[in-house]
Amino acid sequence: QVQLVESGGALVQAGGSLRLSCAASVRNFDDYAMGWFRQTPGKGREFVAGINWYGDKTNYEDSVKGRFTISRDNDKNMVYLQMNALGTEKTATYYCAARRQKTYDAGEALYDFWGQGTQVAVSS
């Protein structure tokens, strides 16, 4: 079983930056690929970024490429999402997810464990 706890959500001005963190409670964290998803009110969760078990391969949703960076620290069981130049994003809840595979995937259904989410609000 993997427990995931996100933190770092806040109200941020358009153009600003924010870093989300996800702490994983699991023995073999490097057995898991990780992902960040987000959900706006009334919509389903969408893939934002994914990272493989080692941290040397990443993937991003097109609209965040060049602005968001996913990273992980396997020694600390942590995953991060650095978000820069926020502005096109609407207020959303960001979720951290763990996949019991070494490689990431953009499919929500392919992740096995989810955190409770952290809210990010962007003010114009």
Image (cartoon, rainbow, N blue to C red):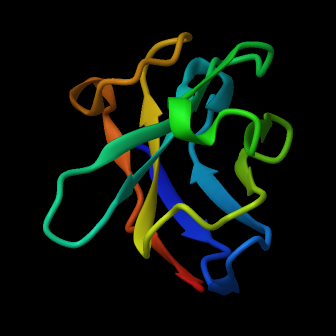
- Residue at point 53%, 30% (across, down): 62
Q: Where does residue 47 sit, x and y in percent of width and height?
A: 40, 37
Q: Where does residue 104 sit, x and y in percent of width and height?
A: 51, 18
- Residue at point 54%, 39% (across, down): 63
- Above or below, 31 relative to 60: above
Residue 60 is left or right of residue 113, and the answer is right
- Residue at point 54%, 61% (across, down): 88
Q: Where does residue 55 sit, x and y in percent of width and height?
A: 77, 22
In front: 95, or 60? Answer: 60
Residue 65 sits in which quadrant? top right
In front: 89, or 23? Answer: 89
Query: Considering the image in quadrants, where does the C terminus appear?
Result: bottom right
Residue at the extreme left of the image, as rendered: 42
Circle count: 0
Residue 74 is left or right of residue 7, and the answer is right
- Above or below, 58 relative to 23: above
Residue 75 is left or right of residue 53, and the answer is right
- Residue at point 74%, 45% (across, down): 67
Query: Considering the image in quadrants, where does the N terminus appear?
Result: top left
